[in-house]
Amino acid sequence: MLVWLLMLAGIMAVWLVMPDALGEKKKKLIFLGFALAILVFILGSRDEYSVANSDVYGYLKWYRRAIALPLNELLEYTAMEKGYLVLNDVLSWFVPWDRFIMYFQAAFCTGVMFWYLYRNVDNVFFAVITYICIGAWQFFLTTFRQAIAICICLIALELIKKEKRSCDIGALLLIILATTIHTTAWVFLIVFIVRGLKLRKGFIAFCVLSVLLISVFIDDLVDIANETLGRGYTAGMQRGNAFGGIVPILIYVGTFVLCFIAWKNDNSFTKDYSFEIKLLALGLCIYVFRYNTTVFERISFYFTPVIAVLLPAAVEHQKLKTERRIITVIGISLCIFLFAYRVVQQYGNYRFYWD
């Protein structure tokens, strides 16, 4: 448990001790580099039972099988997505050590997230803390396939935002690649529709329609998810921790309020961040159904990681410097509180794999 808290404290300390004389760009890059190293070491070095979830042990077993079996036998061994099995086979050729998949997943997912944050927000410290504490990072701890698929979709998102045909084709190919890692990545195709919607009445109507459709077809959607994920989710039952779900929802809603104020202060805000606002709204519409079944929480994480960009950006566009400081302190405090709560209630004691 102490290691999880020290991990976050170490990342915060790196930012605090770095002098402003380095310059904004260099400071951002150095901080992200140190934070990446800390996260990859902690995530890659953990025992597979450090988080109360059996998924990590299963991914270690599959990597061991990739080391031991030829590709044709590995592909016939299970109905798991073939892209993920091929990835394991390729990696095992270069590094035939089962722990490597832990470090690879940590480095790839954290690296892509940090790349996305660096491209889209100035206050990378607030962005990194938000990413670690709000929800996506916790999900990435145990869901290797979907975590990799989500990060591939984030790369696709940056291409989709360019609104060029060649970029759209590249983004589509990336989403198809992501579906070979985890089938649920098909849901990210909706981003092409979202791009064409204005952040006005049409988009609000789209969100309302999405909620209504999910409500009407929830049983069918859960059945599809069970078949895709190989799980046994049941619709109509409250699943998951209520407190751990309510706090992120409040932070999402608070972010929308800050975005509205930022737009009032600077009309260009919605132009720069309209995509992130729309994706977070869509993700929230899906996320609230986590109280029906947790499968919707899993799907929402294709969209909600944009909170790590949107919250710091909205704070930066508040009018007064005093307001920005107060909101930043409150926001980071809430993030740390949520992280500490989850460490105590959900993560459990950290153990290094060599212990």
Image (tube, helix red, strand yellow):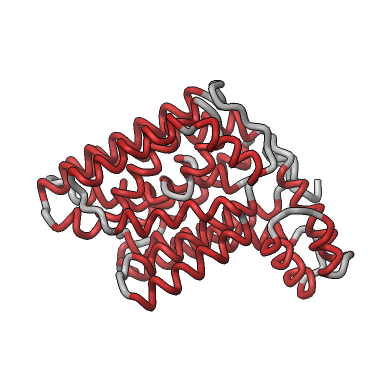
Q: Is residue 199 left or right of residue 236?
A: left
Residue 185 lies left or right of residue 261; in this view the side is right
Q: Is residue 319 visible?
A: yes
* Residue plotted at (84% across, 57% down): 77
Q: Nearer the viewer, residue 57 or 24?
A: 57
Picture coordinates of residue 162 (x, y %)? 31, 70
Q: Nearer the viewer, residue 95 or 330?
A: 95
Q: Residue 240 appears at what percent x and percent y?
A: 56, 27
Task: Say if residue 16 shows up in the picture.
Answer: no
Quarter the N terminus occupies: top right
Residue 228 position within the rendered picture, expressed as x and y whole percent measured from the top left: 64, 46
Q: Residue furthest bottom?
A: 166
* Farthest right residue in view: 68
Q: For this view, does 243 lie left or right of residue 138? A: left
Q: Position of residue 256 (x, y in %)?
A: 26, 40
Q: Residue at x 47, y 23 (%)?
A: 243
Placement of 307 over or under 232, stated as above or below: below
**Residue at image coords 68%, 57%:** 81
Q: Residue 66 occupies which quadrant of the picture? A: bottom right
Residue drawn 66% across the image and 63% down it:
104
Q: Is residue 48 above or below residue 343?
A: below
Relative to 272, 226 lies left or right? right
* Total count of labels: 0
